[in-house]
Amino acid sequence: STLSLLLLLVGVAGFVGTTLIGGFLKQHMYRTLVTIPLVMAIIAGG
């Protein structure tokens, strides 16, 4: 059904996102810890 497909896509996207951000964090930990809150603040303020 459509709901099952959507849930599957959300799960796959979450897994891929976690995998990508994990590799990025290993390489650029400090920059990531500064950048992510700044981006979130810009999104919330804008």
Image: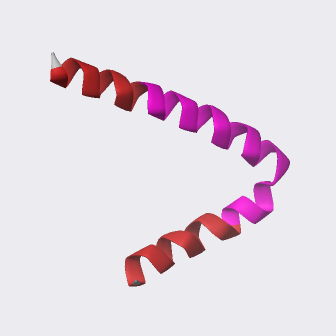
- Viewed as shown, does residue 34 lie left or right of 46? right
Instruction: Kindly identify the residue that appears in the image at 75 percent across and 38 percent down.
Output: 23
Query: Total label count?
Result: 0
The image's colour scheme reads secondary structure
Instruction: Kindly identify the residue that appears in the image at 40 percent across and 26 percent down.
Output: 11
**Quadrant in the rendering for residue 17:** top right
Instruction: Kindly identify the residue that appears in the image at 49 percent across and 79 percent down.
Output: 42
The spot of residue 12 in percent (x, y) is 45, 25
The spot of residue 9 in percent (x, y) is 37, 27
Q: What is the residue that sits farthest to the front in this orientation?
A: 2
Instruction: Kindly identify the residue that appears in the image at 22 percent across and 18 percent down.
Output: 4
Q: What is the residue that sits farthest to the right in this orientation?
A: 27
Tell me if residue 40 comes above or below residue 24 in the rendering: below
Residue 16, magenta (yes or no): yes
The spot of residue 31 in percent (x, y) is 77, 64
Q: Which residues are magenta?
A: 12-33
**Quadrant in the rendering for residue 22:** top right
The spot of residue 33 in percent (x, y) is 68, 62
User: Where's the N terminus, which quadrant?
Assistant: top left
User: Where's the C terminus, which quadrant?
Assistant: bottom left
Name the main secondary structure of what is drawn in magenta. Answer: helix
- Viewed as shown, does residue 38 lie left or right of 33? left
5 or 22, which lies in front?
Answer: 5
Residue 29, magenta (yes or no): yes
- Viewed as shown, does residue 14 lie left or right of 25? left
Tell me if residue 41 comes above or below residue 16 in the rendering: below
13 or 31, which lies in front?
Answer: 13
Tell me if residue 4 comes above or below residue 29 in the rendering: above
